Image: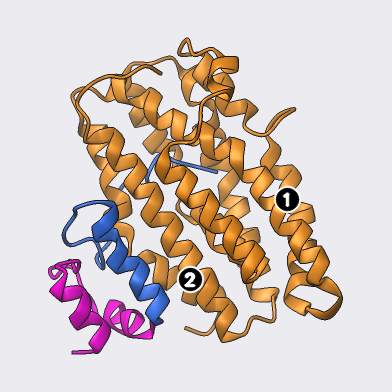
Chain colours: A orange, B blue
């Protein structure tokens, strides 16, 4: 594979059978309507944490940038990308609005602690940014390559019979992430990555897909309906 | 058979029906740390045939 983005994509594609499973199980689940708010909560937690995570990577990259060409390239990419991830006045606003459409109190949701798998995901990213190199966050962002398609979201709306307002974030990303995915690919290929950078990005990306799969499987494997 | 593929097979993580030559090549390119993440899936969720193959329906999770 001639490009760094292609090599990363090939590694992450190995996990598609696992990554595919929760979405398929949700669409086929007899209680998809009851489970959707918990999927949406995962999205809202990620939306809440992503901008602060990217900002941590940006701060670290700026610190290294003087003597580190990869860090310099990362600064330019993150300065452009972070505003695109805001989606509202505060990080995660749009996902909160979707939860609100299902009757969730935004203030109550803001006070909730991260679920363990999402906490593990964010904490491992912060540790790699701090202790190894901020380019690790590129592996986290690679989830944008696996965004849902509009027809998948429409199918979920149909299956759950929930208001369309509870799917605005997903519908938006089904469109937006086509461009975000292309920008990420171009950014990776513009960085002068050495093999150890690529390995770190690979570990970060594989870990992200694994932990998100695990978090989502917890939702679809529990038949009970919990509070949203 | 490569060493990495052998180790994932022992854990029953390989989707044998869908495994292609391209998957085998990529698996052998994985570092020890990357391989450890794949093996760690056994800790995160009990699923077999999680590696290799193709996906049909992306997870409805976005960042």
Mark 1 or 2: in front is: 1
* B12 over A28 or under it: above or below: below
Residue range of the region highlighted in magenta in the rendering? B1-30
- The C terminus of chain A: image quadrant: top left
Sequence-wise, which precedes: disc 1 or disc 2?
1
Q: Is residue A144 visible?
A: no
Q: Residues within 10 Å of mark 2 (few under 14, many from 20)?
A: many
Q: How many marks?
A: 2
Chain letter behind tag 1: A
* A29 over A23 or under it: above or below: above
Residue B20's spot in the image, x, y percent? 23, 77
Q: Which residue is mark 2?
A: A202
Q: Which residue is mark 1?
A: A55
Residue A82's spot in the image, x, y percent? 73, 48
Which quadrant of the view contains residue A132? Answer: bottom right
Q: Secondary structure at mark 1?
A: helix
* A8 over A18 or under it: above or below: below
Residue at (56%, 50%) from the top-left corner?
A: A178
Residue at (62%, 32%) from the top-left corner?
A: A92
* A165 over A153 or under it: above or below: above
Residue at (75%, 43%) from the top-left corner?
A: A83
């Amino acid at each position: 594979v001639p490009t760094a983005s292609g090599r990363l994509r090939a590694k992450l594609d190995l996990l598609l059978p696992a990554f595919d499973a929760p979405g398929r199980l949700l669409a086929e689940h007899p209680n998809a309507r009851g489970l959707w708010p918990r999927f949406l909560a995962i999205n809202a937690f990620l939306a809440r944490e992503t901008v602060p995570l990217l900002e941590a990577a940006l701060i670290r990259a700026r610190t290294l940038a003087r003597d580190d060409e990869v860090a310099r390239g990362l600064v330019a990419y993150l300065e452009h990308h972070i505003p695109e991830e805001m989606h509202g006045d505060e990080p995660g606003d749009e996902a909160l609005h979707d939860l609100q459409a299902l009757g969730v109190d935004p203030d109550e949701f803001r006070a909730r602690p991260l679920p363990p798998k999402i906490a593990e995901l964010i904490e491992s990213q912060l540790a790699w940014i701090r202790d190894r190199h901020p380019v690790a966050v590129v592996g986290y962002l690679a989830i944008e390559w696996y965004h849902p398609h509009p027809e998948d979201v429409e199918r979920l709306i149909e299956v759950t019979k929930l208001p369309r307002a509870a799917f605005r974030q997903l519908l938006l990303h089904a469109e937006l992430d086509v461009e975000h995915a292309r920008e990420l690919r171009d950014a990776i290929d513009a960085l002068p990555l050495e093999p150890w950078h690529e390995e770190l990005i690979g570990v970060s990306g594989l870990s992200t897909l694994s932990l998100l799969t695990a978090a989502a499987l917890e939702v679809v494997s529990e038949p009970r309906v919990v509070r949203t | 058979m490569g060493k990495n593929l052998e180790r994932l097979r022992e854990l029953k993580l390989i989707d044998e029906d869908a495994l292609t030559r391209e998957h085998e090549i990529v698996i052998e390119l994985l570092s020890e740390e990357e391989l450890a993440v794949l093996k760690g899936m056994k800790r995160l969720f009990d699923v077999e045939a999680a590696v290799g193959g193709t996906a049909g329906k992306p997870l409805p999770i976005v960042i």
